[in-house]
Image (spheres, helix red, strand yellow):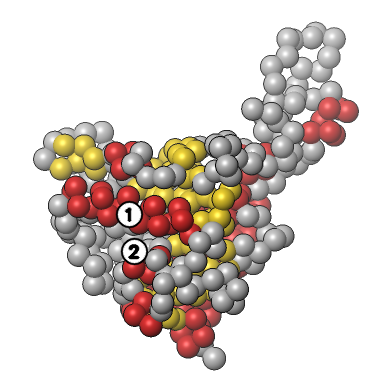
């Protein structure tokens, strides 16, 4: 049986909070409006999410990879206040369906229109989420090379956190994940090779899933704007369940095809997994008298050759 027949659901056929963790099986793809579909998901189902919503570019922004950003059936051109309020509503629904201690990684960018700057924090501060970190995605290439400003080669990824009680800090990352820093460098997928106008590179959701969930215990990964299915593919290859939502039947069929052929993309996952590694443990470096990632005065009697700051870090043994 194909993935389409096994996992594709229609929004109109679902009742409120019908999607439970037990009903997910390997995962579900749901065709419908994002906000409406989220209301069909039970509380506290999701462990981690990652997405990039439409940016409200008014369907006129051009760049190197695509002529302009035009989706299959969604019109990415609404009044900015309406757009921002809708994003707040969507993010608050995602907060509800996320389990306490869960995270959501929200990719967006700073935009300008007629000299006015729109920053994602303008609406993120209005949501229920705790903003844990702002990550810079250095995409290397500029979407627009006009000289009104320095070329914008970055986008932002906001790590949003749902606290357990009043503990806003949450669980510490393993050093093998944290060492990848808050600047992620990598080019986007080529829009000329993917029918979706703004596809994720596979390493990006894979990095999120590996860092937050790992690969040993199965969790649930949400992408409420699933597009061409990159997040679902990453979740499947890393051993997790997925929930993907999109209005477009075309994009969901594309996602189904990718899920059916997911093993062909495993090499990219393995490349990302290889980055989440340390050569020696902190205990081994302590025994060898090597750098532990903290400042020490120079001692001429000791070998002053030191590795990189993160070379010996392991798990949670570097304290904040």
- Residue occupying image coordinates x 38% and y 83%: 13
- Residue occupying image coordinates x 49% and y 38%: 132
- In front of the other: 246 or 91: 91
Q: Is residue 109 above or below residue 246?
A: above
Residue farthest left in this picture: 114
Location of the C terminus by quadrant is: top right
Question: Mark 1–mark 2 contact, CB under 8 Å?
Answer: yes
At which x and y percent is residue 174? 68, 42
Location of the N terminus by quadrant is: bottom right
Under tag 1, what secondary structure?
A: helix
- Residue occupying image coordinates x 60% and y 73%: 22
Under tag 2, what secondary structure?
A: helix
At which x and y percent is residue 303? 81, 18
Would you say residue 193 is visible in this rendering? no
**Residue where numbered disc 1 is placed:** 89
> Is 11 positioned to the left or the right of 222 in the image?
left
For label 1, the crowd category at 10 Å Cα-Cα, with few meaning under 14, some 14 to 19 and many 20 or more, is some
């Amino acid at each position: 049986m194909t993935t389409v027949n096994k996992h594709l659901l229609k929004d109109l056929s679902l009742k409120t909070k019908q999607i439970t963790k037990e009903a997910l099986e390997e995962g579900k793809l749901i065709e419908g409006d994002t906000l409406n579909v989220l209301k069909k998901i039970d509380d506290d189902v999701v462990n981690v999410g990652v997405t990039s919503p439409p940016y409200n570019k008014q369907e006129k922004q051009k760049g190197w990879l695509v002529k302009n950003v035009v989706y299959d059936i969604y019109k990415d051109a609404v009044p900015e206040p309406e757009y921002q309020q809708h994003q707040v509503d969507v993010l608050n629904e995602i907060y509800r369906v996320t389990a306490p201690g869960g995270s959501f990684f929200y990719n967006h960018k700073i935009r300008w229109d007629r000299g006015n700057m729109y920053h994602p924090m303008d609406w993120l501060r209005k949501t229920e989420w705790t903003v844990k970190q702002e990550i810079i995605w250095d995409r290397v290439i500029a979407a627009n090379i006009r000289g009104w400003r320095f070329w914008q080669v970055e986008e932002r990824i906001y790590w949003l956190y749902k606290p357990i009680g009043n503990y806003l800090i949450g669980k510490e990352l393993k050093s093998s994940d944290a060492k990848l820093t808050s600047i992620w460098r990598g080019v986007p997928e080529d829009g000329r090779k993917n029918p979706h106008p703004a596809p994720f590179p596979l390493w990006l959701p894979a990095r999120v899933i590996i860092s937050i969930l790992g690969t040993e215990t199965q969790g649930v990964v949400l992408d409420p704007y699933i597009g061409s299915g990159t997040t679902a593919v990453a979740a499947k290859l890393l051993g997790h369940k997925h929930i993907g939502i999109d209005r477009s039947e075309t994009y969901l069929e594309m996602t189904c095809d990718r899920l059916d052929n997911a093993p062909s993309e495993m090499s990219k996952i393995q490349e990302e997994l290889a980055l989440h590694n340390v050569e020696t443990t902190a205990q081994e470096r302590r025994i060898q008298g090597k750098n532990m990632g903290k400042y020490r005065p120079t001692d001429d009697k000791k070998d002053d050759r030191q590795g990189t700051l993160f070379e010996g870090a392991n798990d949670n043994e570097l304290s904040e």
